Image: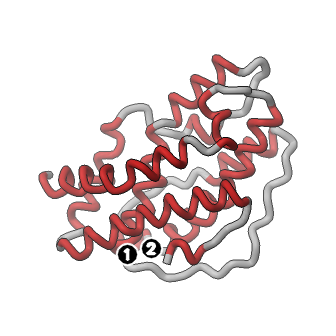
């Protein structure tokens, strides 16, 4: 378990500033319960949809070789958008690329880690919104840090060298840059993940 803890600490340190930058994006402030309306919420979900759906597709191609069970939340996000009468954003015709097994753990860190704050976000939205909002995407998140244990355990098995661990950490940073760019600019730049 020590290797998992070391990986966890290294990932947190490497992505701390990027995580803060992502959380501070103006389009996502609605998730903190600020200026919540159906329109601001729908706009934030639309901004989040494209990078989330694309990264899930990239990761899903690698899951069999990683021996890890990831539960996609893209369908939940689509249901929330549909309930808001918001068209599902079309994904541009981007090719999916192959990633190294070690890199997928960095991508999964962002995807799985985002679930940790989901229950808190759902509570803020329910408490601060003057109207009922669909929060299926956030409701499918975990409620406590122990939910990450399967991720930490499997990543410790797969990242069995310092080189693989560094590749995973680099991939996590790239995933944060990918999200930040997509949410700020409204378009995907998959080359940020390579």
Question: Is 78 in front, or is 164?
Answer: 164
Vertical arrangement, residue 97 with respect to residue 9, above or below: below
Please tell me in which quadrant of the rendered image residue 103 appears: bottom left
Q: Position of residue 91 (x, y in %)?
A: 75, 68
Q: How is the image coloured?
A: secondary structure
Q: Secondary structure at mark 2?
A: loop
Lateral position of residue 90 relative to residue 111, left or right = right
* Crowd tier of the residue under label 2, counting other residues whose Cα lies within 10 Å: few below 14, some 14–19, many 20 or above: some
Does the residue at mark 1 contact the one at mark 2 (Cβ under 8 Å)?
yes
Q: Secondary structure at mark 1?
A: helix
Q: Residue at position x 58%, y 37% from top?
A: 138
Please tell me in which quadrant of the rendered image residue 3 appears: bottom left
Q: Residue at position x 65%, y 21% from top?
A: 126
Please tell me in which quadrant of the rendered image residue 74 appears: bottom right
Question: Is 9 in front, or is 144?
Answer: 9
Q: Position of residue 66 (x, y in %)?
A: 35, 70
* Crowd tier of the residue under label 1, counting other residues whose Cα lies within 10 Å: few below 14, some 14–19, many 20 or above: few
Q: How many marks?
A: 2
Vertical arrangement, residue 131 with respect to residue 111, above or below: above
Question: Residue 65's mark?
Answer: 1
Q: Position of residue 64 (x, y in %)?
A: 41, 72
Q: Residue at position x 22%, y 61% from top?
A: 156
Q: Position of residue 73 (x, y in %)?
A: 58, 50
Q: How many angstroms separate mark 1 from mark 2 (CA)?
A: 6 Å
Vertical arrangement, residue 38 with respect to residue 60, above or below: above
Lateral position of residue 94 relative to residue 65, left or right = right
Lateral position of residue 168 relative to residue 108, left or right = left
Give the residue number, with chain letter if any, for mark 2: 62
Q: Residue at position x 59%, y 23% from top?
A: 124
């Amino acid at each position: 378990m020590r290797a998992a803890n070391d990986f966890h600490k290294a990932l947190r340190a490497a992505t701390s500033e990027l995580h803060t930058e992502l959380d501070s994006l103006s389009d996502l402030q609605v998730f903190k319960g600020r200026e919540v309306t159906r329109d601001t919420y729908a706009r934030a979900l639309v901004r989040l949809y494209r990078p989330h759906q694309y990264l899930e597709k990239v990761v899903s191609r690698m899951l069999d070789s990683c021996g890890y069970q990831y539960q996609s939340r893209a369908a939940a996000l689509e249901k929330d958008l549909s309930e808001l009468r918001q068209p599902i954003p079309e994904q541009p015709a981007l090719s999916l690329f192959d990633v190294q097994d070690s890199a997928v753990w960095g991508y999964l860190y962002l995807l799985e880690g985002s679930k940790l704050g989901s229950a808190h976000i759902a509570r803020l939205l329910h408490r601060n919104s003057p109207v009922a909002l669909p929060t299926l995407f956030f409701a499918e998140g975990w409620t406590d840090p122990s939910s990450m244990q399967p991720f930490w355990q499997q990543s410790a098995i797969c990242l069995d060298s310092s080189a693989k661990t560094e590749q995973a950490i680099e991939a996590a940073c790239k995933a944060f840059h990918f999200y930040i760019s997509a949410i700020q600019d409204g378009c995907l730049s998959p080359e940020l993940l390579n």
